[in-house]
Structures are given as structure tokens and as C-alpha cells.
Image (cartoon, rainbow, N blue to C red):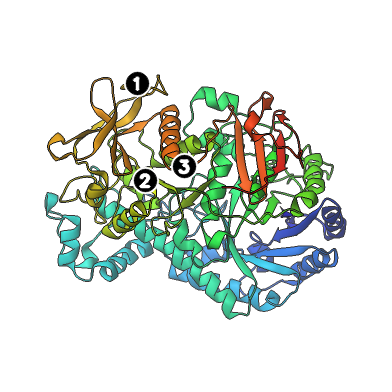
Amino acid sequence: MQLGVCYYPEHWPSQRWADDARAMVEAGISVVRIGEFAWSRLEPRSGELQFEWLDKAVATLADAGLSIVMGTPTATPPKWLVDAHPEILAVDEHGRPRGFGSRRHYCFASSVYRTQSERIVRLMAERYANHPAIIAWQTDNEYGCHDTILSYSPAACEGFGHWLEKRYGDVETLNHAWGSVFWSMEVTGFDQVEAPVGTVTEPHPAIVLDYRRYCSDLVVTYNRLQVDTLRGAGVSVDIVHNFMGLFTEFDHFDVARDLDIASWDSYPLGFLERGAHDETTRDRYRQQGHPDFAGFHHDLYRAMCQGRWWVMEQQPGPVNWAVSNAAPLPGMVRLWSHEAFAHGAEVVSYFRWRQAPFAQEQMHAGLLRPDGSESRAWQELLAVRDELPGLAQQNITTTPASVALMFDYSAVWACQIQPHAADFDALELHLSWYSALRRLGLDVDIIPPTAALDGYAMVVLPCQVIADEALAERLSAARTAGTRLIIGARSGSRTVDFQIPAQLAPGSLTPLTGITVDQVDGLRPGTHPRLNLPSSPKGHGLRWREHLDENRQKARVAHRFEDGMPAVTDHQGVTYLTAWLDEDSMVAIFNEACRKANIGTTLLPEGIRLRRRRALCFAFNYAPEPRHLPDRLIPDSGYLVGGATLPPAGVSVWSITPWHR
């Protein structure tokens, strides 16, 4: 459990560097990330390399005893490169190049940019690969930030045809898979396929899904280029990338296969505004962030790289990019830090050391103000510094949870392509299910559809739109082994080629669920069919409901809507939900399922979240009022941090003896 910080020596006079490094060490910081935006300083003109300043910065930080994460600078190609090769720029859906003047102004499909990226990464790696203070390398920065995954440049459009030929082999197979006979969209050659943009009405959904897959694969191969270049130049330490929150435009599991560590940039307040929350929730958690925003992403990125993950950027104060930019409630920086460690983070790194007095991020807070004085987060950093040694003496290895939640990026894409109800947001649905589980005091593993299911007492699939036979077989084997399954609406409703399954929804999951969907009902905002659920009397559906084919139904109806329509079915240990249900209903359904699966639950007070890490249990209070822990959680042996009553932004930690899941 180490503390880190993001530092930009090129922003400050070199005379300050040693003082900054010394202050970092005194504050308990041991890891520093540098370099990820420095291309114009490293190479101000083509071929004119100026590494001396970076040599000095690395030496200064190393002499202070700091470990370094070296970032490759490819997120910000310099002006001379854009002028020489304007074809490296991404092109938006209106045919406009996304030009120079900020960052991430490149197209993943550009062979020219890949060549230039390989060159600068290789030069950096050859210079610093064996430096003992550099413990990791970060590839690029925040792939896809500012909506930069989907590009319609000539290179991207041409590459799409080649990608399709490799995927399908021949155009007959392609036409059949897509159903291109519809609206006379058949092609006789891969060079005839156009990117799904600029069409008169909505483009073919199968083409859109494949374009999403193609663009995701471009990120994978671009990241792999950097990893291979680093390794080829002698880098033997960990390689990491910093992913983002609420971002699903490429498959992070695929990118992470080439990494040693997954990391993400945690900004709970900025993303509260971007999340699909009502105004009451936004007002209540304005200075804290939603109680499950950080936890969901901690568990998502923990699912990658064999459980090794960091927070590369932790918000220490107001940001500059949200709709409104709240200051954190006092104590929240400390809470967010401990929460990350509770979920298994190896490093929590704050963004940034000193607030910049210039350019786009001058309103983005750091640990220090622009004049070098301490920001309000400083004392919270020191508190975490002082509390970590006592926690590190405990057995804090991470272990599997009893409950797993399946998350598939292609399911999010499928619902974006054909929402059928205007506000059907699959990512929001996954977050709602996750929140319902966490409100019951449960630890949750987030897993991809390819993950092993052994050892889980319960696996939940909120919206597994594309469920192939291989997944169905593994789910069936898990069910036979005693795992309880809960499957949400829309699961299995499309094949891998984005067609309705021959046996209708839920497709390959039909034998497991014992139901067949007759028709779907996209509910308009404000239409909330009431649910007969004794433990949640105000339960209701929203956004989506399915009507079942009673003639094919083998499952037992466990709960109905007030109009008699099935809401929840059960078939030999497999629960199916016919609708998007409100979160309180999900808490009740999960609680009932946990009882049947012999999983202990504790309904937590509003705003409280728990997380166990082997011998320790952490509690966090996101509510703006004090909260008291339920009596059954109060330990006999006292607390390592905090106590039974948690103030707003409060943290409590205690030992669990014996440890239990």
C-alpha cells in the first residue's frame, strides 16, 4: 500500500525539483509518475532530441529515494508532427479533422502515427530501460478520453475492410452474418464496405457493432505496439495504463491482457455529474461522489492483470472539467484513499503535486496550490500516511468474493446501438445491480464473460445481451456445482452477429432460464409498473419490460407485477428478471437469493459501504450525516482506525477473526 503523485517537472523551474522531491518523501509519497505529456520538450523539432532535462529530473527524484513511473508521451503529438503528417489526425462523424490545440489528437488507425509512436517510445526506453529508480512504465494516457476512440479517417475506413476480411474470410459469410439483404446492403467485395457514419437514417446495427469491435481492436494493437517496443528495448519492469471512469468505448479486458498492472483515474465528484443520477442523489452526494462509483471501478479494474491494479490519478480537490466542480467534503480524500486500498490497490497516486497556474487545467486542484502552499487535501494525505503502517502489519492479501457480477463491454455497445427505450443505459444498469449488492454489505468480484466461475456462491448477469453457447455451458456447469445464477432482462437477446436468436431470447440461455421472451416493451419515462414484492412494497419496473411466452414457459413465476405479468422467475436455481427493476427491489431480490445460497448479508445504513481485505474490514461513510455501524459488525477487539460511529467522510477499520467471506 504505497502513496504516489503525478508530477510535471517540465512545468516548473529545475531549481524547485529537489525541494519538491524532498517534500514528497516527507509526506509519505514513494511513487512519482512523470513524462506522459512531454513530447514537445523531448523533441521540439523532428529528430532534435533533448533528454537532458528529463535525465536531471529522473536523477533528482531518484536521489530523494522516490520510485518513478515513466509515461510514454504519445497522448500529445507535437505541432511539427501534425504539420508534417496531418493524416495522423482523427476525423469525427461530420468529416472534420480533430486538430491540434489540446490533446489526444491522433487516430489509432494511422500507420504513420504508429511508426512515430514506436520511434519515440523506443528512444525513451533505450535511454531509461535500466534505470533502477524506474519501477514501471505507463503507455500513453487515458486511451479514448474526449471521445477519441471512434474515428472515420481515411486510414480508419480503409482498415475496417481489412479487419472484416480477416474476421469473415469472404463476403458471402459477411453478408449472411449481417443480414445485408435487408435494404439491399449486400456487397461483393470488402472494399465496398463503408464505415457506419453519415447515413440517411440509422446505420445497420451489425455494421455498427463490428465497427465498435474494430475500433476497440485498434486500441489493443496500438497499446501492444508500445508494450512490445518497451520490452524490445530492454524494459523488464511493470507496464501499466491508466483507464478512466464510466468509459466503455473499447474493451479494457482486451487491452489489459498486454499489461502487468491495470490502473484508473478516480474522480468521484466530476463523474457524479456525468452519471445517470437524479437531482436528489446529485445534491446529496455533491461533495462525496456516489457511494459505489469508486468501488465499482476498483473492482472492475481489479478483474484485470491477475488482480494487480493502481489508482494512477486520485482527485484531491475540485476538478476543472465537470458540469459543476464541487470541493470535496473534508475527509473525502482520506476516505477515497483508504477505500482504494481496501479493494486491493497497490498504489494510490494523487493528481497532481502542484496545481498549474496556466493552460486548460489551471482550475484543477493539486496537493499544493500554484504558489506551492499546502492545499486542503494536504492534512488528509498526512493522515493516510500515518495510518497505513498499522494496517500494513495485518494480513491484507485480497481473496475472491462469494458474489461475482459479469460485465461485458459488448453488452453496453449493443444497448447503445439499439436501446429500444430512450434511456436504457446498460452501464447504469450494471452500476445499479452493483449498488444493490454493496448495500447488503457484500464484497463483489466483477468478471468478464470469459472468466472462470469456480468457487462463486452466486453469479449475477445484469444485461448479458450476447451470450454464446460457450458461456451458456459454463453457466450451466456452475449451476450444477451449486452456484446460484441471477440473469437480467435482454440477456441472450442477440447472437454474436447481432441477430435475434433462432430460438428467440434469451437465446442460448433458454434451457437455463426456462423462459422464452414473446415481445419487449420499451417503457417511456414515468411509466413504472408496480411490483408485488413483499419485502419491497414500493418496487417497480422502469425503462424495459419483457412479456413471456406462456406456452413455452418451464420456469416458476416467483413474483409478478400488479397487472399479473411475470417479473421474476425461478428455474432450478436460476433467477430471471423480465424487467429493469428499481434498486430497492434488487436489494430485496438479492437478499432472498443470498439466503438461498447461504451468503451472509447485512443491510447497511444509507451511505455506508463495507469492504473486506483478508484480515481487515473497512467501513466508509458517504452520507453527509454521522452513521452508526450495525451491532452485528461491531468488533470485540476494538478498531485500528475510527470507531463504531462514523462521521461524514469517516473511515473505520477493524480486524476480522476468524476471516470470513
On the image, the x and y values in percent for residue 478 come to 36, 54
Residue under the point 75% across and 54% down: 392
Residue under the point 54% across and 47% down: 297
Mark pair 2, 1: CA separation: 30 Å
Residue type (three-letter) at the residue carrying disc 2? Leu
Q: Which mark is residue 598?
A: 3
Image height of 459 relative to 305, above or below: above
Mark pair 3, 1: CA separation: 37 Å
Q: Which mark is residue 485?
A: 2
Image height of 151 relative to 167, above or below: above
Mark 3 or 2: in front is 3
Label 1 SS:
loop
Residue type (three-letter) at the residue carrying disc 3? Asn
Asked if residue 108 shows in the view, the reply is: no
Q: Which mark is residue 350?
A: none
* Residue situated in front as seen by the camera: 537 or 15: 537
Sequence-wise, which precedes: disc 2 or disc 1? 2
* Residue situated in front as seen by the camera: 329 or 470: 470
